[in-house]
Image: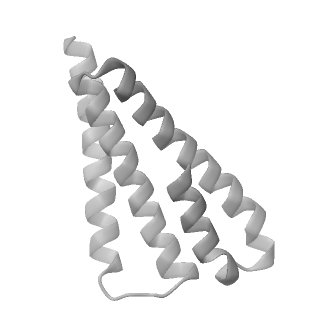
């Protein structure tokens, strides 16, 4: 929640007025997802929960990088960083499901 709030605060001046409410809702949903995965990992302390929490954090990172590039300061390496963090996040989340099914 702190990271999501910090990202939103940094980007706020560059977000066009009509986009502000949708961006706040999306940031809240994304932050809640990552926080819930981290909280479950803290309680369960198992491999599946760790994979899901790290995947959730990387998913939040990938979308934050998109937002920085769109509403903040565009940077050259954004495309590669977004794709790498996004696909790694998806892979880890999928691995967490497989790990949970194996028990």
Q: Position of residue 69 (x, y in %)?
A: 47, 80
**Of the pair 5 and 79, the residue shown nearer to us:** 5
**Of the pair 83 and 58, the residue shown nearer to us:** 58
The residue under the point 70% across, 53% down is 25
Q: Position of residue 24 (x, y in %)?
A: 69, 59
Q: In this view, does 47 lie to the left or right of 66?
A: left
Q: Where is residue 7 in the image (x, y as percent from the top left)?
A: 54, 67
Which of the 4 image quarters holds residue 80? Answer: bottom left
State whether residue 51 is above or below residue 87. above
State whether residue 14 is above or below residue 35. below
The residue under the point 39% across, 44% down is 56
Number of dots carrying numbers: 0
Q: Which colour scheme is used?
A: one colour
The residue under the point 28% across, 22% down is 45
State whether residue 86 is above or below residue 95. below
Which of the 4 image quarters holds residue 4? Answer: bottom right
Q: Position of residue 67 (x, y in %)?
A: 52, 72
**Of the pair 53 and 16, the residue shown nearer to us:** 53
Residue extending farthest to the top is 103
The residue under the point 29% across, 82% down is 77
Q: Quadrant of the C terminus?
A: top left
């Amino acid at each position: 929640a702190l990271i999501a709030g910090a990202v939103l605060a940094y980007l706020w001046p560059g977000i066009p007025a009509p986009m502000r409410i949708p961006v706040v809702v999306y940031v809240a949903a994304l932050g809640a997802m990552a926080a819930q995965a981290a909280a479950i990992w803290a309680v369960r302390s198992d491999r599946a929960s760790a994979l899901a929490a790290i995947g959730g954090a990387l998913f939040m990172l990938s979308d934050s990088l998109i937002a920085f590039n769109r509403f903040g300061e565009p940077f050259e390496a954004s495309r590669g960083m977004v794709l790498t963090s996004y696909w790694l996040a998806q892979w880890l989340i999928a691995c967490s499901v497989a790990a949970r099914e194996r028990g």
